[in-house]
Image (cartoon, rainbow, N blue to C red):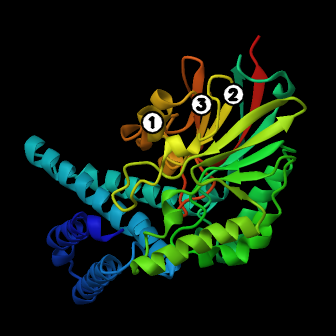
Amino acid sequence: MIVKILIPILLLLLVSDVYVYLHFLRYMKRNKIAAITAWAAQSVAMVAYSVVMAVQPDFAPADMDCLNFYLLLLGVWAVPKFVFTVCSILGWGHCVYHKTKTNWGNYAGILAGVFLAVVCVYGFTKGFNKVTVRHVTFESADLPEAFDGYRIVQFSDAHVGTYTGQRAFMLKVVADSINSQKADMIAFTGDLQNMRPSELYQHEKTLASLKAKDGVFSVLGNHDYAYYVKATEAERRHNCQEMKDVQRRMGWKLLLNDNCVIRRGNDSIVVAGMEFEGESPRVPSFGNLKKTLHGVNQKGAFILMLQHDPTSWRTDILPHSTSQLTLSGHTHAGQMKFFGWSPASLKYDEWGGLYTEGRRAINVSCGVGGFVPFRLGCPGEIVVIELKKHK
């Protein structure tokens, strides 16, 4: 995870450390040696910490607390320090150009740095611990009369390995919120684990407590296939199978390129679950739409499609099926929003919310958790979807 951005991180650390030394520390008159020694020590420590995080054989260390503490340090120290450096350089340039003495960039940099540090702490604490309920109504002329008003609760990207220590209670909050919706069906759209199925063991009871009239349906996300741990192919298959076994043990109906029918009297809808199909550099695509809809009369059926990655909606589901509503996750909405805009929009056309194409739609959940326990302006969400017969 860190190895891909190690060079930018080292530049961010060293540029600011060298600048502070050249422009401030070496001109000190009192406690100069002690200040320079302390500054050099923190610089060496951060560089060493960065290298240790980068050389991990897996996507992330087994002890996620080490990674989370490192990311917190970047947010409250390294990034604010770099922002101060940029502001100070701009202020220094202003002084040179206008021939003034007071570098206001130093003061602006201090304020900006403190602000960023506070925002980072908030995102790692209260920001990540918030959960909201978003309500969506989807109307379709193809929906059978008996399913008018049918309620689905969608949640996605739980990443339960992040809910350790003091955060463990949050998963119980999520489960209680889901059950309080009294849904006809619960749909989980992938990424239950971070890297290993063992992360689920302490949370099995909580996840098994999810109840709905027609049950809990799920599909696998890219993290659930166990490619984020360096292992042999046999070990990877074992871990992936363990993930499947745990979900079934919890009473969930895991759909692996297959479908099932939900009936209300003589009416019915199809719930189809397509395996991961996306552009992940680490995880291959396993989705098979033809197999997923095997035995379904697409001309007459209302199809609810579950697929972790929303990019499959335009590449596969829209052109090659008649699925009226697709539920996805994966994007986390970047775990950040600024006045409704998310950095995830730079990569995904559909990154959070309900999107329509003619009479068909996809709902992309922003997820309830995250590999990194940080959210800013984008709380975890549970989505309540009500199906309505369009007349």
Tag 3: residue type?
Answer: Ser
Q: Nearer the viewer, residue 162 or 320?
A: 320
Q: Vertically, is 386 above or below 171?
A: above
Tag 1: residue type?
Answer: Asp
Q: Nearer the viewer, residue 15 or 239?
A: 239
Quarter occupied by residue 365: top right
Report if the CB atoms under discs 2 and 3 are less than 8 Å apart.
no
Q: Would residue 7 appear left or right of 353 to someone viewing this image?
A: left
Which secondary structure, mark 3?
Answer: loop
Lower sequence index among marks 2 and 3: 2
At 69% from the left edge and 28% from the top edge, which residue is drawn?
A: 302
Coordinates of residue 187 in the picture (x, y in percent)? 70, 48
Q: Closer to the camera: disc 2 or disc 1?
A: 2
Q: Residue furthest top?
A: 391
Tag 3 residue? 323
Query: What is the crowding at mark 1: few (fewer than 14 residues within 10 Å), some, or many (at least 20)?
Result: some
Please give the label number shown on residue 157: none
Q: Is residue 377 visible?
A: no
Quarter occupied by residue 7: bottom left
Tag 1 residue? 316
Q: How many angstroms separate mark 1 from mark 3 (CA)?
A: 11 Å
Quarter occupied by residue 163: bottom right
Tag 2: residue type?
Answer: Ala
Lower sequence index among marks 2 and 1: 2
Q: How many angstroms separate mark 2 from mark 1 (CA)?
A: 18 Å
Report if the CB atoms under discs 1 and 3 are less than 8 Å apart.
no
Tag 2 residue? 301
Q: Vertically, is 229 above or below 327?
A: below
Q: Would residue 377 appear left or right of 184 to someone viewing this image?
A: left
At 61% from the left edge and 39% from the top edge, which residue is drawn?
A: 305
Coordinates of residue 111 in the picture (x, y in percent)? 40, 54
